[in-house]
Amino acid sequence: MAWIWITLTLALFAHLLLRALLRKTQSKKKLPPGPRGYPILGNLPLLGKNPHHDLHKFAQKYGPLMHLRLGFVHAIVVSSPEVAEQFLKTHDLVFASRPPHEASKHISYEQRNLAFAPYGPYWRNIRKMCTLELLSNAKINSFRSMRREEVSLLVNFLKDASHNRMVIDLSAKISSLSADMSCRMVFGKKYMDKEFDERGFKAVIQEVMVLGATPNIGDYVPYLASFDLQGLTKRMKAVSKVFDAFFEKIIDEHTQSKKEGGERKDFVDVMLGFMGSNEGEYHIDRPHIKAIILDMLSGSMDTSATAVDWAMTELIRHPSAMKKLQGELEIAVGMNRAVEESDLEGLDYLDMVIKETMRLHPVAPLLLPHEATEDCIVNGFHIPYKSRVIVNAWAIGRDPKVWTTHDPEEFVPERFLGSSVDVKGRDFQLLPFGAGRRGCPGMQLGLTVVRFVLAQLVHCFDWDLPSGLSPSDLDMTEEFGLTTPRAKHLVGTPRYRLSE
Ligand code: HEM
């Protein structure tokens, strides 16, 4: 009997010793610096309406590699190009996952979509399908005539408004154009706003973007999740019910009317081609298709519209840049016809305007959160397994140590003159599309739409602000979400300037 007691005592002793040793080694691991947190909630109460601004302020005090405790979650905030390169290139594989959160559970079909799927074979498979089958150059080009039709509709509307000297809500028009182009590409047709829900299609997708980005206490203090203290889960469930019913209807319509060989296939047609088949490369079912439809819509609608809206705002605020861009388009295209997508190659000033807009107003200021799949050491600091990594692209874009030729707070497209810095994820000082394995797979499509729509709006029209409002009075407040558009809509009166 005595040997049992001896064994148990030894086991207990070994266990206590091991725990003490573990604590000691863990406490030796140095986390990056950061502000002290409150009990339980940690640093969560420090984040306000614009978390990218708050994190920027803290980074100025604690440095470009900062640690926060958000409830029970370690959060690592990255605010310089050098540190961003460590996370998105040097250790990209370790940080290529996404953290689970309530929004991905309720809105994104239990993380089945591409944007929120954890790193692993499923994510690799659907990423490959989206890149090769939906977002390839050939597929983007196959929708060129559709984009042209939709942009022409807007230009014709604005031409009439110009003759009648009407004040136009330009932000709303850009957003509708983008929604119409996305619907035609994803579903094959436009959906009248109210057919979707009494609030309207765009309002529902915008609600998704806001719910996806609002810090949710339940994500950080899991035992509080079921109380839904902010009422976010209730809103998520309501919104997901609306679009799930709509996507069901779309899939039914598509399965009932199979396209003939020569007809252009929309994204739902392409995905249905892979559904249920065990021979094809991708095995996807109805919930996956619905999750990816949501990805493609939320990825393409608000992002491009937000970028064009900010670019128009900055050009109206900076008439000399507007004139310069109009001059470039006049030389390349003339004044007798509208810009075509084929004209867009080699328009250097247009590219500089877009880069400068994306530097100052990155569409997704904090990218999407990344998650560590194992412990890692970065710049001598311990980054624990399951840390949530937040890259503050907004802060990097206005860092005076990086942007030295002109005041980083100023809109000066010329700062890119003779510079090779690009938005494509190779230059870590400019990361509007992220970088590495999780970088945006829709970049080419996004850039095509932004360049084409912006070029048309600038080439076809001069823009007057409502009387009494000068360009410098424009309200530049942002509305933080997964995408961050202007808080107040941009309104103005177009003046048609082509000679036809
Ligand atoms: C101006 C346009 C766009 C901008 C600025 C933009 C920006 C971004 C950013 C910042 C990320 C996160 C990168 C990261 O976490 O490191 C992202 C991811 C993503 N974007 Fe875009 N995007 C745009 C257009 C599009 C389009 C047109 C689509 C598809 C139709 C799209 C689909 C996606 C998807 C699916 C992801 C998640 C990728 C993954 O997690 O593997 N985006 N985008």
Image (cartoon, grey):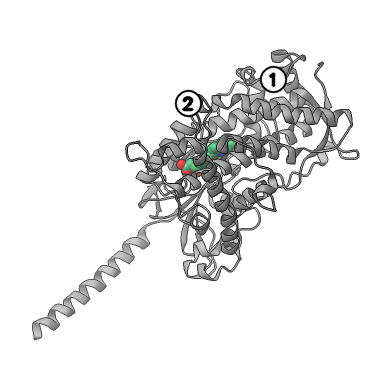
Q: Nearer the viewer, residue 345 or 238?
A: 238
Residue plotted at (44% across, 31% down) = 132
Judge depth for marks 2 and 1 and give the one in front. 2
Say left or right for 22 vs 483.
left
Q: Nearer the viewer, residue 282 or 256?
A: 256
Inspect this view and state whether residue 436 appears.
no
Q: Label 1's element?
A: loop
Residue 166, by quadrant, is top right
Label 2 residue near ligand 1, CB within 8 Å: no
Task: Name the residue type under label 1.
Answer: Val
- The x and y percentages for residue 52 are 61, 50
Label 1 residue near ligand 1, CB within 8 Å: no
Q: How many marks?
A: 2
Q: Nearer the viewer, residue 339 or 365?
A: 339
Q: Residue furthest front?
A: 256
- The x and y percentages for residue 62 are 54, 52
Inspect this view and state whether residue 342 appears.
yes
Residue 416, by quadrant, is top right
Q: Label 2's element?
A: loop
- The x and y percentages for residue 305 are 66, 38
Q: Label 1, on which residue?
A: 339
- Quarter of the image containing the N terminus? bottom left
Which label was assigned to residue 371? none
Label 2, label 1: how many angstroms apart (C-alpha)?
Answer: 32 Å
Residue plotted at (57% across, 57% down) = 241
Which label was assigned to residue 261? 2
Residue 336, by quadrant, is top right
- The x and y percentages for residue 459 are 75, 22
Question: How many other residues sit within 10 Å of disc 2, few (<14), some (14-19) or many (≥20)?
Answer: few
Task: Name the residue type under label 2.
Answer: Gly
Sequence order check: which comes first, mark 2 or mark 1? Answer: 2
Question: How many other residues sit within 10 Å of disc 1, few (<14), some (14-19) or many (≥20)?
Answer: many
